[in-house]
Amino acid sequence: MRAPELRLRAPTPGLLALPWDRPLSDWIVPEVPLRDIAVGPSRHLVKFVDADEQLWAVKDMPPRLAIKEYDVLRRLEDMGLPAVRPAGLVLQPEFDTAILVTRYLEGSWQYRRLFMRLPPDEPKHRARLFDAMAGLMVELHRHGVFWGDCSLANTLFSRDGQSLQAWLVDAETSEVHPSLSRGQRQHDLEILVENVAMGMLDLAERLGSSEELQATLIGEAEHIQVRYDTLWETLHAEPVFGFNDRYRVEGTIRRLNELGFAVDELSMQPVSASPDQFRVNVAVGDRRYHAQRLRDLTGLDVGEGQARILLGDLHAYQAQLCREVGHDVDESTAAQLWVIEVLRPYQQLAHDAVHHAGTAIQAYCDLLEVRWLLSEQAGQDVGTNKALAALARNVIPNDSAAKLAIAEVPTAPFSVLEADDD
């Protein structure tokens, strides 16, 4: 018998002890600590293994494809892109196959699960999902990554503040280039729109939806192209300003920062045909502007959407602190006090309130949003304790993006949970 070849990035005892000398189809419980997790349509056998207090996804593939996907995922990780993290590759020459190992993305959802739990007459929730997919494609394309098979089945979603983060799951058809041509980007988008439309129609038919809703869903899938184009143009626009309108450059930078992008370099070049005007070119970095700012102040490593919310809470706390002490308090000092006096205790209370669904930091972001919405309804600040009570009872205002969190709380009494996963 030909022994398997192992390449493990996390050579922990539990992973090393798995039966790598046997086909994945022969892995059974209780010999192997498998966890039953529903997966969407897949060309390959996928199982999930509990080992060393972590969850790992293992996928059976032809060796050539497995090696290619492992290498692509390594490159995506090096670039800091939102994709599942590769953990190992096992070649099994005895069976002419291979097993790709990736870290399970904790707190993530498949679109199928979300779609079947959200009311079909609330397109705003689907809009958040499609914003996330368009944003993911823009980030991949900016870094020269051609996905080649973007679909609902190959994408996972996680909460990031009151927005969603989309994650690439399957890189089997992906390629990494120095840059992508317009034609390559357009081809990738056409694949995305077609796959998403087909996936949504399949789910809609399973729910017995009307032809009118199916037409709506197709239109929403096609609109992902518009979302993508809008974001791409914002990042790559080269506006022309008059020399006396240089202040408008600040507005350009601010819009990019609001989208979460830091500015790596700004260049202003005179326009040859109009010497009193200049063309602005902004080179943007990764989409972690607020996340990096929060990390510098507190050491916290959170998502961009979460960081935006937390910075707002921090600045409100800083203003209150200045009023209480009667003099200015610098941002760094306020940040340290905010973590100790506000964030740590209340994120734990918020996490308890949602039965430890998701992460504690996301629960605190939801608490802040619910408090704001309740205060808007009441016309005054209702305080954190009332918001905690609402969160604990799942009495979440209808306009809240936090309602998406109900997919993580199987005991929540919302009507949208009445749809069966299958």
Image (tube, rainbow, N blue to C red):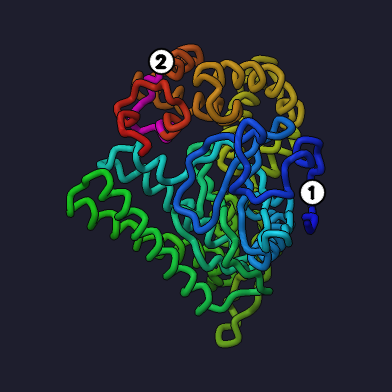
Q: Residue at x 79, y 41 (%)?
A: 16
Asked whether 86 falls inside the magenta stretch, the response is no
Of residues 318 and 272, the one nearer the viewer is 318
- Seen in the image, is 39 located left or right of residue 86? left
Circle 1 crowding by C-alpha within 10 Å: few under 14, some 14–19, many from 20: few
Q: How many marks?
A: 2
Q: Can you give x and y, in whole percent of width and height, for residue 93 in the image?
A: 73, 62
Q: Farthest residue toward the left?
A: 211
- Seen in the image, is 206 located left or right of residue 381? left
Q: Amino acid at mark 1?
A: Arg
User: What span is in magenta?
Assistant: 393-403
Disc 2 target residue: 393
Q: Residue at x 58, y 39 (%)?
A: 308
Circle 2 crowding by C-alpha within 10 Å: few under 14, some 14–19, many from 20: few
Q: CA distance from mark 2 to mark 1?
A: 43 Å
Disc 1 target residue: 9
Q: Can you give x and y, in whole percent of width and height, for residue 11 in the image?
A: 81, 43
- The quadrant holding residue 142 is bottom right
Q: Earlier in the sequence, mark 2 or mark 1?
A: 1
Observer-side mark, 2 or 1, equals 1
Instruction: Tell me, yes or no, if residue 392 can be seen here.
Output: yes
Query: Helix or strand or loop: what does disc 2 sit on?
Result: loop
Q: Can you give x and y, in whole percent of width and height, for residue 200 in the image?
A: 34, 53
